Amino acid sequence: MKLTVLGCSGPYPAANGACSGYLVSAGRRNILLDCGAGVLGRLFALMDPAELDGIVLSHLHADHCADMLVLRYYLERVGKTLPVYLPVTESAMFSMLTSEVFKLHDIKLGISFDDMRIESLRVNHPVPAYAVRLSTAGKSMVYTGDTNLCDGLEAFCAGTDLLLADACFPEALWNENLPHMSAVHAAHLAAGSHAARLVLTHFSPAFDIDSLVREAENVFRPVEAAHLSLRISL
Ligand SMILES: [Zn+2]
Ligand SMILES: [Zn+2]
């Protein structure tokens, strides 16, 4: 299984950056996790998006799905449809994604592509949002999506080979009413779930990424920061 980071900013992109987007490849399968602002152009640099096997949207905030609206134009032009797994909600964004080129499925129902299994867990965010766990060939990775502290998340991440975790806030600025964890929480999640490695993500351009990594390293190692074009093979 290979992870390629296409975007890791939130809730808006850094200069020349992109919001949430992660390409997960295994065998001949290519799955896109989230499709935030700026992700589609970076995906085009790697592959034809019409050849994706599916798109998983953790939730329908624009920093995770805005580029679906322009992907739609491309798919209409080439006459392709793609399966999209997402929270089914009564929201303006869900209505905008209702299109003949997207075959929409409820993310809650579980997904499999050949021997790749994708499970989901509802997390703690102001809109319906899900963490996803992808497993294939004895390896697994978990992407938390956007979440603050969440019951059940540690068990969901148990023993994963790679934890890609929301680490938006410095510890000093975090509180329980915010929509995201801190980098320290991401590190505690990695330690408590016995993850093999931690990649911090969902970086706000307002905060210093190196400081977030240092905060996390006081709790768990190895930890690294997501960045554009980071590729990890498991
Ligand atoms: Zn976000
Ligand atoms: Zn969000």
Image (cartoon, rainbow, N blue to C red):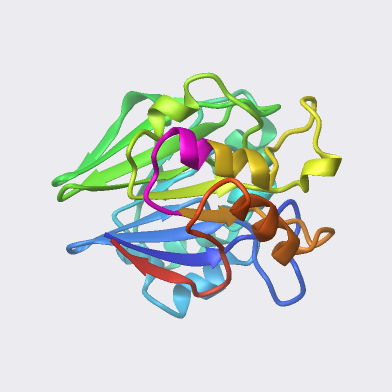
- Quadrant (top left/top right/bottom left/bottom right) for the C terminus: bottom left
Left or right, residue 59 beside residue 61? left
Q: Which residue is at the front of the view, 7 or 158?
A: 158
Residue placed farthest to the top in the image?
Answer: 151
**In percent of the image, x 14 and y 45: which residue is there?**
115
**In percent of the image, x 77 and y 25: which residue is there?**
176
**In percent of the image, x 40 and y 35: which residue is there?**
157
What percent of the width, then of the height, locates residue 135?
25, 44
Q: In this view, does 147 lie above or below 165?
A: above
Looking at the rendering, which quadrant does residue 77 occupy?
bottom left
Q: Which residue is at the front of the view, 7 or 213?
A: 213
What percent of the width, then of the height, locates residue 231?
41, 71
Residue placed farthest to the front in the image?
Answer: 218
Left or right, residue 42 beside residue 117? right
Q: Is residue 92 visible?
A: yes
- Quadrant (top left/top right/bottom left/bottom right) for the N terminus: bottom left
Q: What stretch is highlighted in magenta?
A: 189-197
Q: In this view, does 212 lie above or below 48?
A: above
Q: In which quarter of the image is ligand 2?
A: top right
**In percent of the image, x 34 and y 43: which residue is there?**
160
Looking at the rendering, which quadrant does residue 4 occupy?
bottom left
Left or right, residue 165 beside residue 27? right
| Magenta run includes residue 212 | no
| Magenta run includes residue 195 | yes
What percent of the width, then of the height, locates residue 76?
45, 60
Q: Which residue is at the front of the view, 192 or 122?
A: 192
